[in-house]
């Protein structure tokens, strides 16, 4: 039987470029291990930080070394030019985290190519990426969330009379502590936990430098639980895991510094809470019209047993040690089986 040519698309123009390379390396190994080695032929396709697509030996070298290529020597005329090897791709496996990777942009391009691809389509990806649109969709579906407000950059960078009033309104509605987040960035970039009016002003100004849309969430004292979802029309939920950390909140440094955070799988929570989270994870998956894979994050307030949906991530980190594959491993699906199922789900979709 002929092997299926999988285009492994990685790198990209977001701040999570290096994270993407790590995920892609793990997926490439998974698709070339055991039975998968007889089923799939991998074509690495690397998108440089300036947007140029590269295939062949150069892309393979980045995948193996984990060292991004410099964009300095790239001719701008190469933008929007696909390497000739791309024509042989039968199914795409995009491993692009953050803007221009999991926000619907690359999904739209792959849709126009008329080649199947792993993961959510344009709608699911866009809703999953934009925290404000996501929250509005979850609110419409009746999914519990913490209190929040949304503002735009134009309100933050407005005249001196409007901005203080904006901060007063946020303060009155949400109180402290609260979290200020750019609407369209991943990996906790630009997020701040604030406890005072002056910190709120600084955090809003900083978030506005990253995105024109900003969300502010009320802080809760809660445990952070996560559940993985796998499937298309009939998705399944994994066991529930928990993230603990030694910092004030789960920021970028904590997330990517070894030893700063710990994963507990399965999470030590009552069975009825596990069931509720699994049901809410599948509901969130269907609400945004996700496909293939997603990781859904929750806040669990132990004292009241309240569960709040935090966010859905339609293209979560995918190294051997990332939460998504670890949750499925604990559920009974190992890494090799997981990447195989994702490719098959793409072909089915």
Image: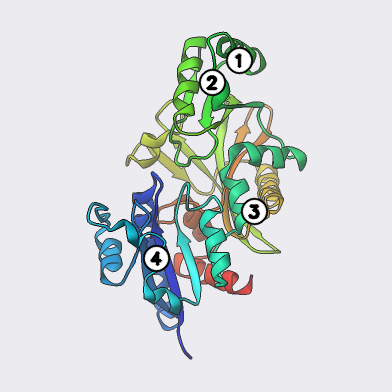
Label 4 sits on residue: 81
Label 1 sits on residue: 166
Residue 234, above or below 215: below
Residue 313, above or below 343: above
Residues at discs 2 and 1 in contact (Cβ within 8 Å): yes
Mark 4: few, some, or many residues within 10 Å (few <14, many ≥20)? Answer: few
- The tag on residue 123 is 3
Of the image marks 3 and 4, the number of the one nearer the N terminus: 4
- Residue displayed at 24% across by 53% down: 70
- Residue displayed at 63% across by 53% down: 124
Q: Please tell me whether mark 1 or mark 4 is closer to you in this view.
A: 4
Residue 81 percent coordinates (x, y) = 39, 65
Residue 302 percent coordinates (x, y) = 62, 30
Mark 1: few, some, or many residues within 10 Å (few <14, many ≥20)? Answer: some
Quadrant, the C terminus: bottom right
The CA span between labels 4 and 2 is 39 Å
Q: Secondary structure at mark 3?
A: helix
Residues at discs 1 and 4 in contact (Cβ within 8 Å): no
The CA span between labels 3 and 4 is 25 Å
The CA span between labels 1 and 4 is 45 Å
Residues at discs 1 and 3 in contact (Cβ within 8 Å): no
Most extreme residue toward the front, as rendered? 77
Mark 3: few, some, or many residues within 10 Å (few <14, many ≥20)? Answer: some
* Left or right, 155 with reference to 65: right
Residue 78 percent coordinates (x, y) = 34, 62
């Amino acid at each position: 039987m002929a092997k299926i040519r999988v285009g492994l698309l990685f790198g990209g123009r977001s701040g999570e470029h290096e994270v993407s390379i790590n995920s892609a390396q793990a997926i490439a190994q998974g698709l070339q291990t055991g039975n998968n080695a007889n089923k799939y032929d991998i074509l690495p396709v690397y998108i440089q930080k300036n947007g140029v697509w590269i295939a062949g030996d150069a892309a393979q070298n980045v995948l193996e070394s984990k060292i991004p290529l410099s964009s300095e020597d790239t001719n701008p005329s190469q933008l929007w030019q696909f390497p000739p090897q791309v024509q042989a791709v039968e199914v795409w496996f995009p491993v692009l985290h953050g803007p221009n990777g999991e926000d619907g942009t690359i999904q739209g391009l792959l849709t126009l190519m008329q080649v199947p691809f792993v993961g959510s389509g344009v709608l699911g990806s866009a809703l999953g990426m934009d925290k404000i649109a996501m929250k509005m969709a979850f609110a419409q579906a009746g999914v519990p969330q913490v209190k929040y407000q949304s503002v735009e950059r134009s309100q933050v960078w407005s005249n001196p009379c409007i901005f203080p009033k904006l901060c007063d309104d946020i303060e009155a509605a949400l109180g402290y502590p609260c979290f200020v987040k750019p609407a369209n960035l991943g990996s906790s970039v630009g997020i701040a936990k604030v406890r005072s009016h002056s910190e709120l002003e600084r955090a809003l100004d900083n978030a506005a430098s990253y995105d024109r849309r900003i969300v502010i969430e009320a802080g809760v004292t809660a445990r952070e639980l996560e559940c993985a979802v796998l499937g298309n029309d009939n998705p399944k939920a994994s066991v529930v895991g928990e993230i603990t950390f030694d910092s004030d909140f789960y920021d970028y440094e904590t997330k990517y510094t070894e030893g700063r955070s710990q994963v507990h799988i399965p999470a030590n929570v009552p069975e009825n809470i596990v069931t509720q989270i699994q049901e809410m994870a599948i509901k969130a998956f269907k609400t945004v019209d996700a496909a293939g894979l997603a990781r859904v994050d929750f806040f669990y307030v132990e004292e009241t047993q309240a569960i709040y949906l935090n966010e859905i991530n339609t293209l979560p980190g995918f190294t051997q040690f990332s939460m998504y594959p670890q949750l499925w491993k604990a559920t009974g699906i190992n890494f090799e089986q997981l990447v195989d199922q994702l490719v098959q789900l793409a072909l089915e979709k």
